[in-house]
Image: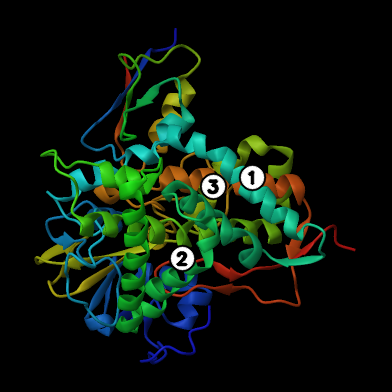
Protein backbone atom coordinates (compact mmCIF):
# COMPACT_ATOMS: atom_id res chain seq x y z
CA UNK A 1 0.00 0.00 0.00
CA UNK A 2 1.25 3.42 -0.91
CA UNK A 3 2.32 5.73 1.89
CA UNK A 4 0.10 8.63 2.75
CA UNK A 5 1.52 12.08 2.14
CA UNK A 6 0.99 15.38 3.86
CA UNK A 7 2.09 18.79 2.61
CA UNK A 8 3.09 21.67 4.83
CA UNK A 9 4.01 25.25 3.95
CA UNK A 10 6.52 26.91 6.26
CA UNK A 11 4.93 30.36 6.73
CA UNK A 12 8.28 31.95 7.66
CA UNK A 13 9.78 30.92 4.35
CA UNK A 14 6.82 31.41 1.98
CA UNK A 15 7.09 34.66 0.00
CA UNK A 16 3.98 34.25 -2.11
CA UNK A 17 5.45 33.05 -5.40
CA UNK A 18 2.24 30.97 -5.62
CA UNK A 19 3.86 28.21 -7.64
CA UNK A 20 2.26 25.58 -5.41
CA UNK A 21 -1.21 26.98 -6.00
CA UNK A 22 -0.63 26.97 -9.76
CA UNK A 23 0.70 23.41 -9.84
CA UNK A 24 -1.42 21.76 -7.13
CA UNK A 25 -4.51 23.93 -6.59
CA UNK A 26 -6.22 21.10 -4.66
CA UNK A 27 -3.47 21.02 -2.03
CA UNK A 28 -2.78 24.69 -1.31
CA UNK A 29 -4.65 27.88 -0.54
CA UNK A 30 -3.57 31.51 -0.66
CA UNK A 31 -4.38 34.21 1.87
CA UNK A 32 -5.34 37.80 1.01
CA UNK A 33 -1.66 38.68 0.47
CA UNK A 34 -1.12 35.72 -1.84
CA UNK A 35 0.93 33.73 0.69
CA UNK A 36 0.31 29.98 0.70
CA UNK A 37 -0.76 27.47 3.28
CA UNK A 38 -1.79 23.84 2.94
CA UNK A 39 -5.47 23.10 2.31
CA UNK A 40 -7.08 21.58 5.38
CA UNK A 41 -4.61 19.55 7.43
CA UNK A 42 -2.38 19.02 4.40
CA UNK A 43 -3.38 15.43 3.74
CA UNK A 44 -2.78 14.58 0.09
CA UNK A 45 -5.75 12.72 -1.40
CA UNK A 46 -4.84 9.53 -3.30
CA UNK A 47 -3.88 10.32 -6.88
CA UNK A 48 -2.44 13.76 -6.08
CA UNK A 49 0.94 12.55 -4.77
CA UNK A 50 2.72 13.62 -7.93
CA UNK A 51 1.33 17.15 -7.62
CA UNK A 52 2.57 17.36 -4.03
CA UNK A 53 6.13 16.54 -5.10
CA UNK A 54 5.82 18.90 -8.07
CA UNK A 55 4.79 21.78 -5.80
CA UNK A 56 7.70 21.09 -3.46
CA UNK A 57 10.26 20.94 -6.27
CA UNK A 58 9.09 24.22 -7.80
CA UNK A 59 8.99 26.34 -4.66
CA UNK A 60 11.79 28.92 -4.99
CA UNK A 61 11.90 29.48 -1.23
CA UNK A 62 12.09 25.76 -0.33
CA UNK A 63 9.10 26.44 1.92
CA UNK A 64 7.17 23.23 1.25
CA UNK A 65 7.64 19.96 3.10
CA UNK A 66 6.13 16.72 1.86
CA UNK A 67 5.86 14.36 4.79
CA UNK A 68 5.54 10.62 4.25
CA UNK A 69 3.44 9.10 6.99
CA UNK B 1 17.57 51.36 -27.46
CA UNK B 2 20.35 53.61 -28.62
CA UNK B 3 22.72 54.95 -26.02
CA UNK B 4 24.71 57.27 -28.27
CA UNK B 5 23.72 60.31 -26.24
CA UNK B 6 24.90 58.96 -22.93
CA UNK B 7 27.75 60.76 -21.19
CA UNK B 8 30.64 59.03 -19.46
CA UNK B 9 31.11 56.15 -21.88
CA UNK B 10 32.74 53.24 -20.08
CA UNK B 11 35.99 51.80 -21.42
CA UNK B 12 35.46 48.38 -22.99
CA UNK B 13 35.98 45.44 -20.66
CA UNK B 14 39.04 43.30 -21.29
CA UNK B 15 39.18 41.50 -17.92
CA UNK B 16 35.72 40.33 -16.91
CA UNK B 17 36.88 38.66 -13.71
CA UNK B 18 38.30 41.84 -12.12
CA UNK B 19 36.58 44.55 -14.09
CA UNK B 20 33.06 43.40 -15.03
CA UNK B 21 30.55 45.92 -16.37
CA UNK B 22 26.92 45.00 -17.00
CA UNK B 23 26.55 47.99 -19.31
CA UNK B 24 29.30 46.77 -21.66
CA UNK B 25 27.96 46.04 -25.18
CA UNK B 26 29.34 42.49 -24.98
CA UNK B 27 27.23 41.82 -21.84
CA UNK B 28 24.19 43.40 -23.45
CA UNK B 29 24.46 41.31 -26.63
CA UNK B 30 25.39 37.92 -25.17
CA UNK B 31 25.99 37.80 -21.42
CA UNK B 32 25.78 34.04 -20.98
CA UNK B 33 29.40 33.06 -21.79
CA UNK B 34 30.60 35.88 -19.51
CA UNK B 35 28.53 34.57 -16.60
CA UNK B 36 29.83 31.02 -17.14
CA UNK B 37 33.40 32.32 -17.17
CA UNK B 38 32.92 34.27 -13.94
CA UNK B 39 31.10 31.42 -12.18
CA UNK B 40 33.98 29.09 -12.96
CA UNK B 41 36.38 31.51 -11.23
CA UNK B 42 34.53 32.49 -8.04
CA UNK B 43 31.05 32.63 -6.48
CA UNK B 44 31.59 36.39 -6.01
CA UNK B 45 33.59 38.71 -8.27
CA UNK B 46 34.28 42.44 -7.90
CA UNK B 47 34.71 45.47 -10.13
CA UNK B 48 36.03 48.94 -9.31
CA UNK B 49 33.49 50.40 -11.70
CA UNK B 50 30.27 51.94 -10.33
CA UNK B 51 32.27 53.10 -7.25
CA UNK B 52 32.81 49.43 -6.35
CA UNK B 53 30.44 46.55 -6.98
CA UNK B 54 30.25 42.80 -6.38
CA UNK B 55 28.55 40.22 -8.56
CA UNK B 56 27.46 36.89 -7.07
CA UNK B 57 27.74 34.27 -9.81
CA UNK B 58 26.01 31.24 -8.28
CA UNK B 59 22.41 30.55 -7.35
CA UNK B 60 23.48 29.88 -3.78
CA UNK B 61 25.37 33.18 -3.44
CA UNK B 62 22.40 35.08 -4.87
CA UNK B 63 20.08 33.34 -2.42
CA UNK B 64 22.38 34.12 0.54
CA UNK B 65 22.41 37.83 -0.33
CA UNK B 66 18.67 38.02 -1.06
CA UNK B 67 17.94 36.49 2.34
CA UNK B 68 20.42 38.64 4.28
CA UNK B 69 18.80 42.01 4.91
CA UNK B 70 21.17 42.70 7.82
CA UNK B 71 24.28 43.09 5.67
CA UNK B 72 22.63 44.02 2.36
CA UNK B 73 20.30 47.00 2.12
CA UNK B 74 17.70 47.67 -0.57
CA UNK B 75 17.98 51.44 -0.11
CA UNK B 76 19.77 51.47 -3.47
CA UNK B 77 18.48 48.91 -5.97
CA UNK B 78 20.11 49.97 -9.21
CA UNK B 79 23.86 49.89 -9.81
CA UNK B 80 24.82 53.26 -11.30
CA UNK B 81 27.93 55.37 -11.89
CA UNK B 82 26.75 57.64 -9.11
CA UNK B 83 25.10 57.09 -5.76
CA UNK B 84 22.23 59.59 -5.66
CA UNK B 85 21.40 60.83 -2.19
CA UNK B 86 18.71 58.75 -0.47
CA UNK B 87 15.61 60.80 0.30
CA UNK B 88 11.95 60.03 0.81
CA UNK B 89 11.37 61.76 -2.54
CA UNK B 90 13.19 59.10 -4.55
CA UNK B 91 12.32 56.14 -2.32
CA UNK B 92 9.83 53.68 -3.78
CA UNK B 93 8.55 51.57 -0.90
CA UNK B 94 8.56 48.62 -0.50
CA UNK B 95 11.23 47.82 -3.09
CA UNK B 96 13.67 50.32 -1.54
CA UNK B 97 12.67 49.43 2.04
CA UNK B 98 14.52 47.25 4.54
CA UNK B 99 13.00 45.58 7.61
CA UNK B 100 11.11 46.60 9.64
CA UNK B 101 9.56 49.19 7.26
CA UNK B 102 9.41 46.73 4.39
CA UNK B 103 6.67 44.36 5.50
CA UNK B 104 3.84 46.83 6.15
CA UNK B 105 4.62 48.70 2.92
CA UNK B 106 4.58 45.46 0.96
CA UNK B 107 1.42 44.11 2.56
CA UNK B 108 -0.41 47.23 1.40
CA UNK B 109 0.37 46.41 -2.21
CA UNK B 110 -0.08 42.65 -2.24
CA UNK B 111 -3.89 42.17 -2.25
CA UNK B 112 -4.47 43.76 -5.69
CA UNK B 113 -1.86 41.40 -7.21
CA UNK B 114 -2.98 37.94 -6.08
CA UNK B 115 -3.62 35.23 -8.69
CA UNK B 116 -7.37 35.67 -8.18
CA UNK B 117 -7.12 39.40 -8.84
CA UNK B 118 -5.16 38.64 -12.00
CA UNK B 119 -7.91 36.33 -13.24
CA UNK B 120 -10.24 39.32 -13.26
CA UNK B 121 -7.77 41.34 -15.32
CA UNK B 122 -7.09 38.51 -17.78
CA UNK B 123 -9.94 39.25 -20.24
CA UNK B 124 -8.73 42.84 -20.62
CA UNK B 125 -5.20 41.62 -21.38
CA UNK B 126 -6.55 39.13 -23.93
CA UNK B 127 -8.40 41.97 -25.64
CA UNK B 128 -5.30 44.19 -25.62
CA UNK B 129 -3.26 41.40 -27.24
CA UNK B 130 -5.84 40.83 -29.96
CA UNK B 131 -6.22 44.53 -30.71
CA UNK B 132 -2.47 44.78 -31.16
CA UNK B 133 -2.37 41.69 -33.40
CA UNK B 134 -5.27 43.06 -35.51
CA UNK B 135 -3.07 46.01 -36.40
CA UNK B 136 -0.28 44.03 -38.07
CA UNK B 137 -1.52 40.51 -38.81
CA UNK B 138 -2.07 41.33 -42.49
CA UNK B 139 1.55 42.41 -42.92
CA UNK B 140 4.38 40.16 -44.06
CA UNK B 141 6.77 41.46 -41.42
CA UNK B 142 6.58 43.17 -38.05
CA UNK B 143 8.80 44.49 -35.28
CA UNK B 144 7.15 42.46 -32.52
CA UNK B 145 8.89 44.50 -29.79
CA UNK B 146 7.59 47.82 -31.10
CA UNK B 147 4.13 46.61 -32.12
CA UNK B 148 3.27 43.89 -29.59
CA UNK B 149 5.41 43.06 -26.54
CA UNK B 150 6.01 46.69 -25.57
CA UNK B 151 2.34 47.60 -25.34
CA UNK B 152 0.85 44.70 -23.42
CA UNK B 153 2.28 45.39 -19.94
CA UNK B 154 2.04 49.16 -20.23
CA UNK B 155 -1.64 49.02 -21.11
CA UNK B 156 -2.39 46.38 -18.49
CA UNK B 157 -0.77 48.36 -15.66
CA UNK B 158 -2.36 51.60 -16.89
CA UNK B 159 -5.71 49.81 -16.77
CA UNK B 160 -5.03 48.65 -13.19
CA UNK B 161 -3.82 52.08 -12.06
CA UNK B 162 -6.76 53.80 -13.71
CA UNK B 163 -4.74 56.08 -15.97
CA UNK B 164 -5.28 56.43 -19.73
CA UNK B 165 -3.80 53.57 -21.75
CA UNK B 166 -3.15 56.21 -24.41
CA UNK B 167 -0.43 57.76 -22.17
CA UNK B 168 1.72 54.69 -22.85
CA UNK B 169 4.48 56.46 -24.76
CA UNK B 170 4.96 58.85 -21.86
CA UNK B 171 5.46 55.96 -19.43
CA UNK B 172 7.81 54.11 -21.75
CA UNK B 173 9.97 57.22 -22.07
CA UNK B 174 10.22 57.70 -18.28
CA UNK B 175 11.21 54.10 -17.84
CA UNK B 176 13.92 54.41 -20.46
CA UNK B 177 15.26 57.50 -18.65
CA UNK B 178 15.27 55.78 -15.27
CA UNK B 179 16.46 52.28 -16.09
CA UNK B 180 18.81 52.91 -18.99
CA UNK B 181 19.92 56.55 -19.43
CA UNK B 182 19.81 57.13 -15.67
CA UNK B 183 22.58 54.60 -15.02
CA UNK B 184 25.14 57.06 -16.32
CA UNK B 185 23.29 60.38 -16.20
CA UNK B 186 21.70 61.29 -12.89
CA UNK B 187 19.94 64.34 -14.37
CA UNK B 188 17.83 62.08 -16.62
CA UNK B 189 16.86 59.98 -13.65
CA UNK B 190 15.83 62.96 -11.54
CA UNK B 191 13.95 64.55 -14.43
CA UNK B 192 11.93 61.39 -15.01
CA UNK B 193 11.16 60.99 -11.30
CA UNK B 194 9.95 64.60 -11.15
CA UNK B 195 7.79 64.26 -14.23
CA UNK B 196 6.23 61.05 -12.98
CA UNK B 197 5.50 62.55 -9.59
CA UNK B 198 3.83 65.56 -11.21
CA UNK B 199 1.80 63.28 -13.46
CA UNK B 200 0.55 61.12 -10.61
CA UNK B 201 -0.06 64.12 -8.35
CA UNK B 202 -2.58 65.33 -10.91
CA UNK B 203 -4.36 61.98 -10.91
CA UNK B 204 -4.40 61.93 -7.10
CA UNK B 205 -5.90 65.42 -6.97
CA UNK B 206 -8.61 64.45 -9.45
CA UNK B 207 -9.60 61.47 -7.29
CA UNK B 208 -9.95 63.59 -4.16
CA UNK B 209 -13.21 64.98 -5.53
CA UNK B 210 -14.13 61.98 -7.67
CA UNK B 211 -12.94 58.62 -6.27
CA UNK B 212 -12.48 55.76 -8.72
CA UNK B 213 -12.21 51.99 -8.53
CA UNK B 214 -8.53 51.57 -9.38
CA UNK B 215 -5.09 51.16 -7.84
CA UNK B 216 -4.53 54.89 -7.36
CA UNK B 217 -7.70 55.23 -5.28
CA UNK B 218 -6.82 51.98 -3.51
CA UNK B 219 -3.50 53.47 -2.37
CA UNK B 220 -5.09 56.80 -1.44
CA UNK B 221 -7.56 54.95 0.76
CA UNK B 222 -5.00 52.60 2.25
CA UNK B 223 -4.22 52.95 5.95
CA UNK B 224 -1.00 52.13 7.75
CA UNK B 225 -0.92 49.88 10.81
CA UNK B 226 -1.92 52.81 13.03
CA UNK B 227 -4.93 53.58 10.86
CA UNK B 228 -3.46 56.70 9.26
CA UNK B 229 -3.49 57.47 5.53
CA UNK B 230 -0.16 57.08 3.75
CA UNK B 231 2.04 60.13 3.27
CA UNK B 232 1.75 61.60 -0.23
CA UNK B 233 5.42 60.78 -0.88
CA UNK B 234 4.71 57.13 -0.02
CA UNK B 235 1.74 56.97 -2.41
CA UNK B 236 3.74 58.67 -5.18
CA UNK B 237 6.73 56.38 -4.62
CA UNK B 238 4.58 53.28 -4.78
CA UNK B 239 2.82 54.49 -7.93
CA UNK B 240 6.18 55.20 -9.60
CA UNK B 241 7.32 51.75 -8.57
CA UNK B 242 4.25 50.01 -9.98
CA UNK B 243 4.59 51.80 -13.27
CA UNK B 244 8.34 51.25 -13.63
CA UNK B 245 8.41 47.70 -12.37
CA UNK B 246 5.36 46.61 -14.31
CA UNK B 247 6.40 47.58 -17.80
CA UNK B 248 9.99 47.12 -18.97
CA UNK B 249 10.24 43.82 -17.18
CA UNK B 250 7.27 42.01 -18.69
CA UNK B 251 7.86 43.65 -22.06
CA UNK B 252 11.27 42.01 -21.94
CA UNK B 253 10.00 38.64 -20.78
CA UNK B 254 7.34 38.40 -23.50
CA UNK B 255 9.84 39.58 -26.10
CA UNK B 256 12.51 37.05 -25.14
CA UNK B 257 9.89 34.30 -25.21
CA UNK B 258 8.71 35.20 -28.71
CA UNK B 259 12.33 35.57 -29.83
CA UNK B 260 13.01 32.04 -28.63
CA UNK B 261 9.91 30.65 -30.33
CA UNK B 262 10.70 32.49 -33.58
CA UNK B 263 14.01 30.66 -33.85
CA UNK B 264 13.03 27.32 -32.31
CA UNK B 265 10.33 25.73 -34.45
CA UNK B 266 10.21 22.50 -32.42
CA UNK B 267 9.21 24.40 -29.26
CA UNK B 268 6.80 26.60 -31.20
CA UNK B 269 5.06 23.63 -32.80
CA UNK B 270 4.84 21.80 -29.50
CA UNK B 271 3.18 24.74 -27.75
CA UNK B 272 0.70 25.11 -30.60
CA UNK B 273 -0.12 21.39 -30.34
CA UNK B 274 -0.15 21.43 -26.53
CA UNK B 275 -1.28 24.88 -25.34
CA UNK B 276 -1.69 23.41 -21.86
CA UNK B 277 2.10 23.32 -21.66
CA UNK B 278 2.39 27.11 -22.04
CA UNK B 279 2.43 27.86 -18.27
CA UNK B 280 5.29 25.38 -17.77
CA UNK B 281 7.12 26.80 -20.80
CA UNK B 282 6.67 30.32 -19.42
CA UNK B 283 8.53 29.28 -16.24
CA UNK B 284 11.39 27.89 -18.28
CA UNK B 285 11.56 30.96 -20.49
CA UNK B 286 11.57 33.09 -17.33
CA UNK B 287 14.50 31.04 -16.04
CA UNK B 288 16.62 31.07 -19.19
CA UNK B 289 15.86 34.66 -20.22
CA UNK B 290 15.20 36.27 -16.84
CA UNK B 291 14.87 39.96 -17.53
CA UNK B 292 15.49 41.53 -14.13
CA UNK B 293 18.73 42.23 -12.27
CA UNK B 294 18.39 43.97 -8.92
CA UNK B 295 21.00 45.46 -6.60
CA UNK B 296 21.82 45.78 -2.95
CA UNK B 297 24.20 48.01 -1.03
CA UNK B 298 26.61 46.35 1.40
CA UNK B 299 26.05 48.02 4.76
CA UNK B 300 28.02 45.65 7.03
CA UNK B 301 31.07 43.53 6.40
CA UNK B 302 30.33 39.82 5.94
CA UNK B 303 31.20 36.85 3.74
CA UNK B 304 29.18 35.33 0.92
CA UNK B 305 29.98 31.78 -0.13
CA UNK B 306 33.29 32.26 1.68
CA UNK B 307 34.14 35.53 -0.10
CA UNK B 308 34.57 38.68 1.98
CA UNK B 309 32.33 41.62 1.03
CA UNK B 310 32.87 45.14 2.34
CA UNK B 311 30.55 48.08 3.02
CA UNK B 312 30.50 50.94 0.56
CA UNK B 313 30.20 48.57 -2.37
CA UNK B 314 27.08 47.78 -4.31
CA UNK B 315 26.02 44.25 -5.24
CA UNK B 316 24.66 43.48 -8.67
CA UNK B 317 22.05 40.94 -7.61
CA UNK B 318 21.64 39.07 -10.86
CA UNK B 319 18.76 36.64 -10.82
CA UNK B 320 19.51 35.89 -14.48
CA UNK B 321 23.02 34.72 -13.52
CA UNK B 322 21.62 32.55 -10.70
CA UNK B 323 19.16 30.95 -13.09
CA UNK B 324 21.97 29.78 -15.36
CA UNK B 325 23.87 27.98 -12.58
CA UNK B 326 24.32 24.35 -13.69
CA UNK B 327 24.66 23.24 -10.07
CA UNK B 328 21.04 24.26 -9.56
CA UNK B 329 19.62 23.50 -13.00
CA UNK B 330 20.70 20.49 -15.10
CA UNK B 331 21.29 21.60 -18.69
CA UNK B 332 21.12 25.16 -17.41
CA UNK B 333 22.03 26.63 -20.80
CA UNK B 334 19.31 24.73 -22.65
CA UNK B 335 15.66 25.69 -22.98
CA UNK B 336 13.71 22.66 -21.75
CA UNK B 337 10.13 23.85 -22.18
CA UNK B 338 8.67 21.00 -20.14
CA UNK B 339 11.21 21.23 -17.29
CA UNK B 340 9.54 19.69 -14.25
CA UNK B 341 11.68 21.03 -11.42
CA UNK B 342 12.21 24.74 -11.73
CA UNK B 343 13.01 26.81 -8.67
CA UNK B 344 14.06 29.75 -10.81
CA UNK B 345 14.62 33.10 -9.18
CA UNK B 346 13.35 35.33 -11.99
CA UNK B 347 11.06 37.17 -9.56
CA UNK B 348 13.67 37.33 -6.85
CA UNK B 349 14.07 35.39 -3.64
CA UNK B 350 13.26 36.35 -0.08
CA UNK B 351 11.20 39.24 1.22
CA UNK B 352 11.51 41.32 -1.96
CA UNK B 353 9.80 38.73 -4.18
CA UNK B 354 8.30 40.69 -7.07
CA UNK B 355 4.83 41.93 -6.21
CA UNK B 356 3.81 41.70 -9.83
CA UNK B 357 4.88 38.09 -10.41
CA UNK B 358 1.30 36.87 -10.79
CA UNK B 359 0.57 39.75 -13.18
CA UNK B 360 3.69 39.06 -15.25
CA UNK B 361 2.94 35.35 -15.47
CA UNK B 362 -0.62 35.99 -16.58
CA UNK B 363 0.50 38.53 -19.18
CA UNK B 364 3.15 36.18 -20.55
CA UNK B 365 0.76 33.25 -20.79
CA UNK B 366 -1.97 35.29 -22.45
CA UNK B 367 0.45 37.06 -24.80
CA UNK B 368 1.92 33.76 -25.99
CA UNK B 369 -1.45 31.99 -26.22
CA UNK B 370 -3.06 34.73 -28.31
CA UNK B 371 0.01 35.15 -30.53
CA UNK B 372 0.38 31.42 -31.23
CA UNK B 373 -3.34 31.04 -31.89
CA UNK B 374 -3.35 33.74 -34.54
CA UNK B 375 0.24 33.67 -35.80
CA UNK B 376 1.43 30.07 -35.69
CA UNK B 377 4.10 30.71 -38.32
CA UNK B 378 6.76 33.35 -37.74
CA UNK B 379 10.52 33.59 -37.79
CA UNK B 380 13.35 36.08 -37.34
CA UNK B 381 13.72 38.41 -40.31
CA UNK B 382 17.26 37.84 -41.59
CA UNK B 383 17.23 41.36 -43.02
CA UNK B 384 16.64 42.92 -39.58
CA UNK B 385 18.62 43.01 -36.35
CA UNK B 386 17.47 42.00 -32.89
CA UNK B 387 18.70 44.51 -30.31
CA UNK B 388 18.72 44.14 -26.53
CA UNK B 389 18.18 46.69 -23.78
CA UNK B 390 21.14 47.65 -21.66
CA UNK B 391 21.50 47.52 -17.92
CA UNK B 392 19.05 46.44 -15.26
CA UNK B 393 16.35 44.88 -17.42
CA UNK B 394 17.29 42.68 -20.37
CA UNK B 395 14.99 42.04 -23.29
CA UNK B 396 14.67 42.57 -27.03
CA UNK B 397 13.94 46.17 -28.04
CA UNK B 398 13.79 45.41 -31.75
CA UNK B 399 12.34 42.09 -32.78
CA UNK B 400 11.94 41.93 -36.57
CA UNK B 401 9.84 38.94 -37.59
CA UNK B 402 8.59 37.59 -40.90
CA UNK B 403 5.00 36.41 -40.58
CA UNK B 404 3.46 33.44 -42.39
CA UNK B 405 4.92 30.21 -43.66
CA UNK B 406 8.45 30.30 -45.03
CA UNK B 407 8.39 30.12 -48.85
Residue drawn at x 25%, y 31% is: A10
Q: Is residue B118 positioned above or below B144 on the image?
A: above
Q: On the image, numbered disc 2 is attached to which residue?
A: B171
* Whether marks 1 and 3 lie on the same chain: yes
Q: Residues within 10 Å of mark 1 (few under 14, many from 20)?
A: some
**Of discs 1 and 3, which sits in the foreground?**
1
Quadrant of the frame with the C terminus of chain B: bottom right
Give the left or right position of residue B399, taking residue B41 as reference.
right
Do we see residue B400 in this rendering?
yes
Asked whether A1 or B340 is in front, the reply is B340
Q: Secondary structure at mark 2?
A: helix
Q: What count of labels does the image hold?
A: 3
| Residue name at image x 21 percent, y 67 percent | B89
User: Can I make out residue B331 in this image?
Assistant: no
Residue position for label 3: B363
In the visual, does B96 lie left or right of B162? left
Report the Cα–Cα distance between label 3 and label 2.
Answer: 18 Å
Mark 3 vs mark 2: in front: 2
Q: Looking at the picture, does residue B191 appear above or below residue B363?
A: below
At horizontal 66% and vertical 77% (from top left) the residue drawn is: B385
**Pointer 2 or 1: first along the chain:** 1
In the image, residue B117 lies at what x, y percent? Answer: 44, 35
N-terminal of the pair, mark 1 or mark 3, is 1
Q: Quadrant of residue B127?
A: top right
Residue found at x 39% / y 13%: A3
Q: Secondary structure at mark 3?
A: helix
Camera-side residue: B195 or B361?
Answer: B195
- Badge 3, how many Cα within 10 Å: few under 14, some, many 20+? many
Chain of the residue under the numbered disc 2 shown in the image: B
Residue at mark 1: chain: B
Residue that carries the numbered disc 1 in the rendered image = B127
Amino acid sequence: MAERLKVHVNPDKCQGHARCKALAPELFELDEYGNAHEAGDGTVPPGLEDKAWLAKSNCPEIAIDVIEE
Amino acid sequence: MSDVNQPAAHPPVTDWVHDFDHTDPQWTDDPFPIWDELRAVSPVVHTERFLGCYLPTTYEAVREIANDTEHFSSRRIIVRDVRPEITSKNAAPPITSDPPQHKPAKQLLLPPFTPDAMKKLEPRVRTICNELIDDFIAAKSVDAAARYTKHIPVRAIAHMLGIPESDSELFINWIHMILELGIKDESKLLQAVQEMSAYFSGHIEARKSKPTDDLISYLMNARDKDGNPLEDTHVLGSLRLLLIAGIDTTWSAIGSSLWHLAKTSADRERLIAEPGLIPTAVEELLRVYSPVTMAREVVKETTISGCPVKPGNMVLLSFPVANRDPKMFPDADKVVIDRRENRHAAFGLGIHRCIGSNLARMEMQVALEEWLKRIPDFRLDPAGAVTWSQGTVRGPRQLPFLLGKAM
